[in-house]
Image (cartoon, rainbow, N blue to C red):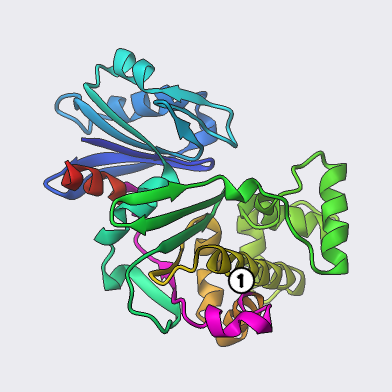
Amino acid sequence: MLIADIGGTNSRIGILKDQKFFNIKVYKTKEHQNLYSIIQSYFSEGFLEKLPEKIYLAVAGPVFEDKARLTNLGWEISVNDLKKKFNFKEVFLVNDLYGLALGSSFLSNKDLKTLKKGKTKKKFPRVFLAPGTGLGISVLIDEGIVLPSENGHTPFCPLKKEEYAFLEYLGTLNEEKCWEKALSGKAVSLWYQFYFNQTLSPEEIFNLAKKGEEKALKIVETMLELLGRKTSELALTFLPEGGIYLTGGLIAGLKEFLAKNNFLDKFLTGYFNNPKMDFLLERFPIKLITHPYPVLLGALAILRNR
C-alpha cells in the first residue's frame, strides 16, 4: 500500500509492507501545484517495482463524501480522481488527525514522553492536539471510533490585554481571528511580528531561542502558555481519561524547551488556568508523541480493522 500524509508544509509518502514503513520521502508541499504532482514525483524516483493498487491518504483538511479540501492550501481532492489518474483500486482518504487518532494504538511507550501524569488508568477517550502549519484536533472516543474536527478555526479567546491587541493586529492583516492563528507554526511568526515588528520564520525564531535570545524566548513562552490553555480547554470539553496527546511541527520546535522545568511550568500554568477545575484537570495524563510518522500509523489500523 502507498501511504501519504499531506500537510500544509511537509508531505510524507512511503510504502507500507508487512506492517512496516519503507522508503519514506518528505516533500515540501508548496513546491507542488497539487497532490497529484507530489504522488507523481514519488513514483518517478523509482521506489516501486510496480504501482500499488491501494493508497492510504491522510490530508490536512475536512473529508466528506470521498472528497477533501486542504484548508491551508485550497487543494481539492477526490477519491474518483485519484482512482482515474493512478489506477488505484482502493483509496482510503481520511483527515490527518483522524488517521493519527485511529493509529494511536500502535504507539508504544518508547514513542511517548509524559509531560504530566494522570490519575486514571482508563484508555478512552483520548484527545489529539497537533499544532503545525494549522491546528489539528481529534478525539478517539473508543477503539476505532474517531471524532475529527476543525476546532482550530474556532475564535481565539484572549485573556490578557496584549492578546486583545494581537486579535486586532490579526484583523489588520486580514487573518482569521481563530485559535489556529494564535497557536501554530504560522502563529510563531505572527506573534513575533506583533511584538517586534519584524518578520522571521518559525525555524529562525526557535534557533534564536535555543541561543537564549530574549525576544525569541518570549515567543516560546507565549506558545507554551497558549498550548497549555488550549489543552485545558479540550480536557474540560471531552474529559479525556485516556489522555491528551501532543504532536505536530510546532510541538517539534517546542520539544527541547518542554524538557526543561522552567518552560514546562509555562505550559502547566496555561493548563491549570482555572483553579476551580484543578481537581478535574489533574486526572488527565498529557503525553508528547515522539514517533516520526504518527499519522501514517492510521494505515495499519485500517488494515487491521479490515
Q: Measured from the top left, where is residue 231 in percent x and y?
A: 57, 67
Image location (x, y in percent) of residue 123: 32, 69
Number of other residues with Cα within 10 Å of mark 1, as a class: few under 14, some 14 to 19, many 20 or more: many
* Residue 196 visible in the snapshot: no
Q: Is residue 277 magenta?
A: yes
On screen, residue 175 above or below 81: below
Q: Work out whether residue 243 or residue 69 is closer to the camera in this orientation and state it.
A: 243
Q: Is residue 19 magenta?
A: no
Front-lying residue, 11 or 282: 282
Any part of residue 29 in sight: yes
Single out the residue that lies furthest toward the top: 84
Residue 142: quarter of image: bottom left
- Circle 1: residue type: Gly
Q: Which residue is mark 1?
A: 228
Q: Residue at x 61, y 75 (%)?
A: 271
- The quarter of the picture where residue 53 lies is top left
Residue at point 34%, 42% (across, down): 25
Q: Does residue 187 appear left or right of residue 287 in this picture? A: right
x and y, in percent, of residue 141 in the image:
38, 57
Q: Which residues are magenta?
A: 271-296
Q: Is residue 8 left or right of residue 202?
A: left
Task: Tell me the SS state at disc 1.
Answer: helix
* Residue depicted at 44% across the width and 77% down the height: 285
Is 186 left, or right, of 236 in this rendering?
right
Q: Is residue 158 left or right of residue 151?
A: right
Going 38% across and 69% down the picture, which residue do you hit? 242
Measured as percent of width and height from the top left, residue 40 is found at 35, 23
In the rendered image, the quadrant that contains the N terminus is top left
Judge by depth and name the residue closer to the eye, 188 or 79: 79
